[in-house]
Amino acid sequence: MKKQYPLLLLLLIPFLSISQEIEPKEKPSNKGRIYVFWGWNRGWYTNSDIHFTGNNYDFELTNVKAYDRQSSFGIDPYLNPNRITIPQTNLRIGYFINDKYDISIGVDHMKYVMRNGQTVKINGNIDDGTLFDENYNNEDILLTQAFLIFEHSDGLNYLNAELTRNDDLLKLFKVNWNSDIVQINTLIGFGLGPVMPKSNVTLWNNARNDEFHFAGYGFAGKVGLNVTFFKHIFFRGELKEGFVNLPDVLTSPDHSDKASHHFFFTELNIDIGFTFNPFNKREN
């Protein structure tokens, strides 16, 4: 019987060779990969208390409602190069520091619009020679445009750096697939940075302020899904939950006129991007 073992080994060699050939290729490391994407977002905000101060007034509005402002969908402005920044947009560039983690910088161009026509509580005083001059003690006030317009509608611009973990979903479920054709990654990350709104605020007859200004900061966590085709083109969806604190909002050309408020936000992003790895010979 022992003499039959060499013959048996000879018969198995071809099958061993075939099994090695069909072994799926090891996915190349993401380390060194660069990506950039452009996209669009929707935003939802919690109610906030807004405190206004100036030379002749000091008052607070409580539990103020706000919403985002979507541009009507169409080639113009969404794909018009001259008007592409008018909708609520996202821009980001990132770099993989290893196979799973990337660092990135970007701007989430959201919009925050106080809802006019709502009734809120007001506390404080106004003595600015207006129809609204009064000492208020937790009284109701209707937020008309004649009294107040309060918008970060030229951009609630959240400038941020993020750290994101990327996990290969197909590999996680042990699905053999050619990663050169499609790759699906789950995303989980955290970011923070300054907020630079361009606010449109008008208090009664005061001139409005309309300039970019670092008014505070924000931070957010996110989850998402990224699908890459042919190693370079990807589509991404992200859900962010975050917090914004704005203690220094300019409300008129006189920088002594200010407002402050903070709120939580939910942001839903849909993005399209390009990625490449200049250090990977398979892509050169």
Image (tube, rainbow, N blue to C red):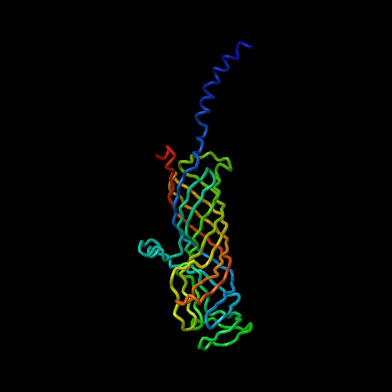
- Where is residue 207 shown, x and y percent of the image? 44, 80
Total labels: the figure holds 0
- At horizontal 49% and vertical 78% (from top left) the residue drawn is 149
Between residue 234 and residue 91, name the one nearer to us.
91
Q: Image quadrant of residue 47?
A: bottom right
Quadrant where the image shows the C terminus: top left
- Where is residue 151 shown, x and y percent of the image? 49, 73
- At horizontal 57% and vertical 40% (from top left) the residue drawn is 174
Q: Is residue 22 left or right of residue 78?
A: right
- Where is residue 181 shown, x and y percent of the image? 46, 42
- At horizontal 45% and vertical 75% (from top left) the residue drawn is 209
Q: Is residue 158 above or below residue 139?
A: above
Q: Is residue 58 above or below residue 194?
A: below
Q: Is residue 264 left or right of residue 271?
A: right
Between residue 179 and residue 88, name the one nearer to us.
88
- Where is residue 66 shown, x and y percent of the image? 54, 72
Q: Is residue 111 above or below residue 170?
A: below
Quadrant where the image shows the N terminus: top right
Between residue 37 and residue 249, name the one nearer to us.
249
